[in-house]
Image (cartoon, rainbow, N blue to C red):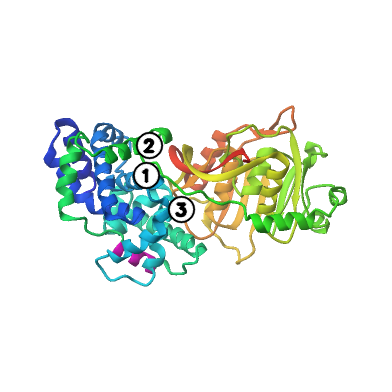
Amino acid sequence: MPESDDIVLLRQYAESHSESAFATLIERHLNLVYSVALRSVGHSHAAEEIAQAVFIILARKAKSLTSGWQRRLAAPLSGWLYQTTRLTAANWLRGEIRRQRREQEAYMQSALNEPVPEVWPQIAPLLDDALGRLGERDRDAIVLRFFENKNLREVGAALGASEDAAKMRVNRALEKLRKFFTKRGVSSTAAIIAGAISANSVQAAPVALAKAVSAVATAKGAAASASTATLIKGALKIMALTKAKTAIVAGVVVLLAAGTTSITVKEIKHHREESVWSHITRCDLKQMDSAPPTVSIRPTRYNSQVAGAAGSAGKILALHQPFDVLLARAYDVSPCRILPLTSLPQGDFDFIANIPQNQKEALQELIRQKFGITARRETRETDVLLLTVKRPGAPGLKPTSAKAGNSFSSDQVGHWRRTDGPIDYLIYDLQYYLQVPIIDRTGLTGRFDVDLTWDDEKKWDDTGHYSFTNPDGLKEALLDQLGLELVPSYEPTEMVVVEKAK
């Protein structure tokens, strides 16, 4: 059945309390919910309780969800159930069996019904954490394609996209999963990972569970056990706090390579800062390379005429920059993705990190030491712009004609020119200009030459900082010359959350 039929059934339940419609939804999605819960907690009885809780939550939220889905084009119910199951399972783990999770993974593996590919035991304990780090649309694509074994045409229909677009999204999401697993010591190909997930991610729930879930859920939990009621209460509280129906309970991301960074900072302390800065008269890569290796941050001693930032081979130099730019360089994001939960130091700063390696980590550690500030990456729903292809084949955007390695860029007011760069380079420029997170929805791969011109000028303020005067002109030029459109949206987006160090 088409994915939209799920919403029809849910609406029947919400409007007329059709138990048969809700029972059909349970029958259709119970194996998915049960499998995600079992993989998360490694205990069949707990997985059954979590499945009951998830469908009770679905019953309680049926009315608001069906009205909300009218504003979301073809959003798959399976994606919502997957996220809610992870949230509920994480809530259960927090209070019950966090210590025992590794041992219970072994139990989970023994319960699989099909032969286990060699890679599956390695990725199974990591899979849901990896999926939780994907964007919502990428995660929905993986769930539809490999958890529900839908073909690419069906995936595209469920996501409101073409079959080709669905294929690109699935492949891109698989590549992100592959990189995630590789960083954690599991080396495999995207194809093998896809096969392992498809064969093993969903398994049959106990036969009696469907009837039990249906009886309790359609009554919206009135007859649920005390432990299930507590579980539902905790999950709903988290969902309310995050203000997102698809909230993710993500693990803590360790940003600082503490041991290496501490050693690095200690090794460079013997260099006097003045001897380093005496080499720097302007933001110049040659001067950075000739200065003694160090990591240094200080209130600026330069005027706005020499303000700028430069980098080469991971090394960083910046003069007369606000603190959010320092954070952006240290955490390798655009300043528009910096989300401060504490007040940031005022004024402008000079900073340099020209040590042979771990430059960003060393800057992060020095920020913590000097300012008592640290940061973490976190997915939050926020206002964004989606970069989409409106007119394919526009003259200002074309596959590169440059030889590999001959990239070139030129920035002037009202004129950007790039050769031999991925679409990410353009997104990087747009984010700095518009100061809004931008998400790539173009599906464009490969490298391109970009030539973009529009009427613009710099406007300087009293602090020596500047802004541009014609963002609407840039957006019009983007559409007219490159065939690309920026569409406002509200999406889960990776941000760098800044707070006081503990």
For the residue pair 36 and 338, the one nearer the viewer reads as 36
Q: Would you name the residue on which mark 1 appears?
A: 87
Would you name the residue on which mark 2 appears?
239
Measure the alpha-carbon separation of dots 1 and 2: 8 Å
First in residue order: circle 3 vs circle 1: 1
Instruction: Say whether marks 3 and 1 touch (CB < 8 Å).
Output: no
How many numbered discs?
3
Disc 1 is placed on an element classified as: helix
User: What amino acid is labelled 3 in the image?
Assistant: Gly
**Disc 3 target residue:** 393
Residue displayed at 61% across by 33% down? 342
Rounded to the nearest angstrom, the CA distance separating label 3 from label 1 is 43 Å
* Residue stretch rendered in magenta on the structure: 192-200
Q: Earlier in the sequence, mark 1 or mark 2?
A: 1
Q: Nearer the viewer, mark 3 or mark 2?
A: 2
Q: Secondary structure at mark 3?
A: loop
Mark 3 crowdedness (10 Å alpha carbons): few <14, some 14-19, many ≥20: few
Q: Quadrant of residue 58?
A: top left
Residue 258 coordinates in the image, percent (x, y): 64, 54
Residue 73 visible in the shown view:
yes
Magenta segment, prevailing SS (helix, strand or loop): helix
Tell me if residue 86 is in the magenta stretch: no
Q: Residue at x 78, y 52 (%)?
A: 284
Q: Is 227 above or below relative to 356?
A: above
Rendered-image quadrant of the C terminus: top right
Q: Position of residue 251 (x, y in %)?
A: 47, 49
Q: Earlier in the sequence, mark 3 or mark 2?
A: 2
* Residue located at (24% from left, 66% from top): 113
Q: Residues within 10 Å of mark 2 (few under 14, many from 20)?
A: some
Contact (Cβ within 8 Å) of mark 1 with mark 2? yes
